[in-house]
Image (cartoon, rainbow, N blue to C red):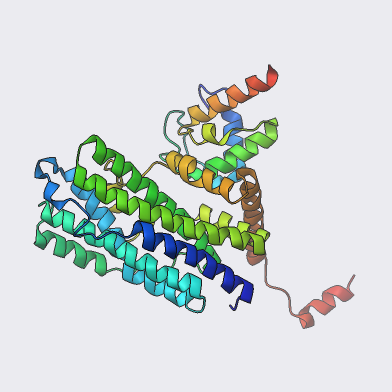
Amino acid sequence: MSVSRAYHEQMYRIYHEFFDVAETKRRWHPFRDLPWEKMDKSKNTEELAICLETFCGVELYVPDYTANAFNMTRTIFGQAWFEANWGYEESKHGLSFREYLVQSGLRTPEQYAQYEEEIFSKVWRLPFTTRRQMTCYGVLQESATYLIYEAQKKRAQQEENELLEKLFFFISRDEAAHRGFYQKVLVYELEEDRPGTLADLAHVISHFEMPGVPLIPEFQKRLLVNGVGITSQHFLQRGIFPLLKAIGTSRSELIKILGQQKAREAERKKGEEMPPAVPLAEAEPAMASK
Amino acid sequence: MTNLDHGDLIKEALAFTAPEEMPQEFSPDSTLGEMGISSITALEMAGYIEEKLSIVFPDDELSQVNTLRDFDQLIRRHTLATQE
């Protein structure tokens, strides 16, 4: 679907700001800016291995995420160029997790290779069909990922794991920046078409799940490990509610829209269950008998 | 619903917002997730109850609700506050 000149310009402005901050304040080198010499293998636990392996698995779908994102945004400079940056930054996350898992001995190179093979045997597919819905998904997904990594950073700090603390500092900061980009796009979408954007947001929130759910081996079992995910309460409190406030809507507005969507869906289903319309030729005698 | 002051209202809210998520048994201390009630349904239930009782739950208190008992206590706190 084509978009207006104003839309292109606004996306460019949002990307320009994102890129400027990324280049001047946020660039980091996974091999040089992390204190790898402070790797402390005595802090290795299977719980930590499962956390890092799960995060790494989710990040390994970068080829699928970016391929889909490029197809969806390729004619809009600001959005497509953001996706290129996004893919680059996320690729560093996967690289860093991989390095940590193997260098720490939490996983042998063979174990890692087998895991990677399992990950690549599945393909991530777009969970929603339109660009605007994917923007809603992006802001939620980045927000959840930020909260998960932020919790990991605090945990590493408590456990005096300086290397992991630094790693999660860089990574959570990137995720916060990604969330910020999607949020700005969403604010603009609201200015352009408030009812339509809110309807998309309500739809995405009610159908949201993290990308790893259908892809990562034994994901539900992994979620039982402390730190792999966050509680829905935490996500509501630190993710959803602040987002609604920041974009100028509220829980009650969203709930009303969800109610309307459900009512429409019920109507649609009811219509499908109705017997098919009687062809005119058959209907006429009945009408005549009245 | 046993031991909950507003058990029937909570049940009514769930029946209205997401009948497909209605559990066979209501356990006041099980988490909403354990009973198959999604967090978005919990928000819709809260909206239904707010409208019914003409009260408003603050977002930060609502986000702490983890079980039906938590829900019940939240309603009790806010209905009492309205009566005072």
Residue extending farthest to the top is B84
* Rendered position, B14 above or below A209: above
Residue drawn at the location 41% of the way across and 73% of the way down: A68
Query: Which quadrant, please, contains the C terminus of chain A?
Result: bottom right
Q: Position of residue B76 (x, y in %)?
A: 59, 23
Quarter location, residue A196: bottom right
* Rendered position, A29 above or below A168: below
Quarter location, residue A275: bottom right
Q: Is residue B82 left or right of residue A73?
A: right
Query: Which quadrant, please, contains the N terminus of chain A?
Result: bottom right
Residue extending farthest to the bottom is A281
Q: Is residue A124 left or right of residue A9?
A: left
Residue drawn at the location 43% of the way across and 65% of the way down: A19
* Rendered position, A281 above or below B35: below
Q: Is residue A289 left or right of residue B51?
A: right
Residue drawn at the location 78% of the way across and 83% of the way down: A281
Q: Position of residue B56 (x, y in %)?
A: 64, 33
Residue extending farthest to the front is A24
Q: Position of residue A227 (x, y in %)?
A: 29, 43
Q: How many labels, in total?
A: 0
Quarter location, residue A261: bottom right
Q: Position of residue B69 (x, y in %)?
A: 49, 27
Q: Is residue A128 left or right of residue A287?
A: left
- Which one is nearer the viewer's eye here, A70 or A19? A19
Residue A90 visible at all: yes
Residue A217 visible at all: no
- Which one is nearer the viewer's eye here, A178 or A132? A178
